[in-house]
Amino acid sequence: MAYSYPTVPAPHYGVPPEEALSRVEAFADLMTTRRTIRDFSDRPVPLELIDAAIRAAATAPSGANIQPWRFVVVTDPEIKHRLRVAAEAEEVEFYTRRATQEWLDALAPLGTDTDKPFLDIAPALIVVFEVHKGPSEPRPYYVKESVGIAVGFLLAALHQAGLATLTHTPSPMKFLSEVLDRPAEERAYVVIPVGYPAPEARVPDISKKSLEEVRILR
Ligand code: IYR
């Protein structure tokens, strides 16, 4: 490889071969226990947990290493409420006008609707933004892929900390830039309420596809 960056030796992770399978299985088992939570308690979340998870997210690979992401952590109840009011206004449009019947039918078993109390109740909302070319931002590449990988790392890290999350995708998301006062080159990607499940929270009894259904060998 002809890098023009200075180089350092590649890390060798030093996982003993006899431990490799149990380690990756433990991680898979951990991730299997993650569920999307829609009923949050108002129990506060230490900001240091969120910061550590964002640090993990920000290690994600990205196109040309541009790292085209920002993570806005909202804990101010007044700002959370403004986000709720604006999101619910968009969702009314979505559920009554924009969504096709096919889409509404797909969502029906999940029981989602225009009411988004978790935006008030969850103690923290992480609003993830894509960063596009701007006055002090370089042109990024593969933005959605890069930010998607970072969000995957973020969800895994938050789960590792015992925190519940929801990937909330109001559409359109322009209001997030307005309420959070973000510049034009940043576009909201997802809203992640973070906290702990309400004591009475329930989740739908759904399952993931088996390995055999999703893995193809050639
Ligand atoms: N943004 C809407 C609708 C919605 C869409 C999908 I795809 C979901 O998996 C869940 C919800 C809402 O938040 O209700």
Image (cartoon, helix red, strand yellow):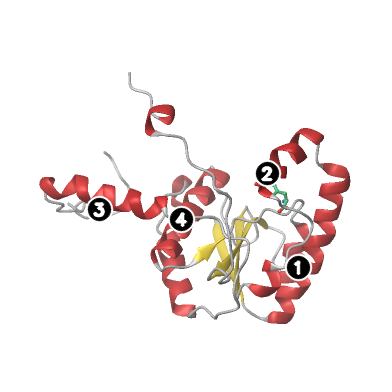
Q: Is residue 99 left or right of residue 142?
A: right
Give the mark, 3 or 2, whose residue is nearer the N terminus. 3
Q: Quadrant of the C terminus?
A: top left
**Which residue type does callout 4 highlight?**
Arg
Q: Foreground mark, 3 or 2?
A: 2
Residue 109: mark in rendering:
2
| Mark pair 3, 1: CA separation | 47 Å
Q: In the rendered structure, are the residues bearing label 4 and label 1 in contact, judged by CB atoms less than 8 Å apart?
A: no
Q: Which residue is mark 1?
A: 84
**Spot occupied by residue 155 in the image (x, y as percentages of width and height):** 48, 58
Q: Would you say residue 112 is visible in this rendering?
A: yes
Label 3 Cα crowd, 10 Å radius (few <14 / some 14-19 / many 20+): few
Numbered disc total: 4
**Spot occupied by residue 196 in the image (x, y as percentages of width and height):** 53, 71
- Callout 3: SS: loop
Give the mark, 4 or 1, whose residue is nearer the N terminus. 4
| Mark pair 2, 1: CA separation | 23 Å
**Which residue type does callout 1 highlight?**
Arg
Label 4 Cα crowd, 10 Å radius (few <14 / some 14-19 / many 20+): some
Q: Is residue 65 left or right of residue 117?
A: left
Q: Would you say residue 58 is visible in this rendering?
A: no
Q: Which residue is mark 3?
A: 7
| Mark pair 4, 3: CA separation | 38 Å
Give the mark, 3 or 1, whose residue is nearer the N terminus. 3
